[in-house]
Image: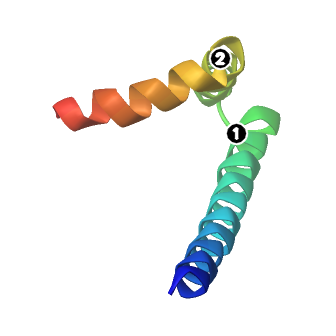
Amino acid sequence: DILRNLLLAARWTVVLSLVSFIGGGIVGAALLFLRIGGRHWLRLLSRGYIQLFQGTPLLMQLFLAFFGLGLF
């Protein structure tokens, strides 16, 4: 029973890792294309998005996502 639960948890870990890897790649590619081309305001928007996420600690982002999104 414990081994079955561990295998189920491992499967979910792999699935969620793949989804986040692919999603991060898509968002990263979109930001890349916004930064190298497009209009000036799109470059500013992508630059602001990058500064926001690089300028805040990951733990704070996770707390905000976990506790903050539940308020809406």
Left or right, 43 with respect to 69, comes to right
Q: CA distance from mark 2 to mark 1?
A: 24 Å
Compare residues 7 and 48 and report the one nearer the observer.
Answer: 7
Q: Residue furthest left?
A: 72
In x, y percent, where is residue 66? Answer: 38, 35
65 left or right, relative to 70: right
Taking 15 as reference, is 31 above or below it? above
SS class, disc 1: helix
Rendered image: mark on residue 2:
none
In this view, the residue in front, 47 or 43, is 47
- Say what amino acid the circle numbered 2 marks: Pro
Residue pushed farthest top?
A: 55
In the depicted structure, whether residue 1 falls above or below residue 52: below
Please give the name of the residue rendered at 63% of the width and 67% of the height, measured from the top-left corner: 13
SS at badge 2: loop
Alpha-carbon neighbours of circle 2 within 10 Å: few (<14), some, or many (≥20)? few
Give the quarter of the image for residue 50: top right
Q: The C terminus lies in which quarter of the figure?
A: top left
- Residue at image position (60%, 76%) is 6
Residue 54 image offset from top left, x and y in percent = 72, 20
On the image, the x and y values in percent for residue 25 come to 74, 56
Tell me the residue at 23%/36% (across/down).
70
The picture places residue 9, in percent across and down from the top left corner, at 57, 73
Which residue corresponds to mark 2?
57
How many C-alpha atoms fall within 10 Å of the one at disc 1: few (<14), some, or many (≥20)? some
- Identify residue for label 1: 34
Residue depth check, mark 2 versus mark 1: number of the one nearer the observer: 2
- Of 7 and 3, which appears nearest the observer? 3
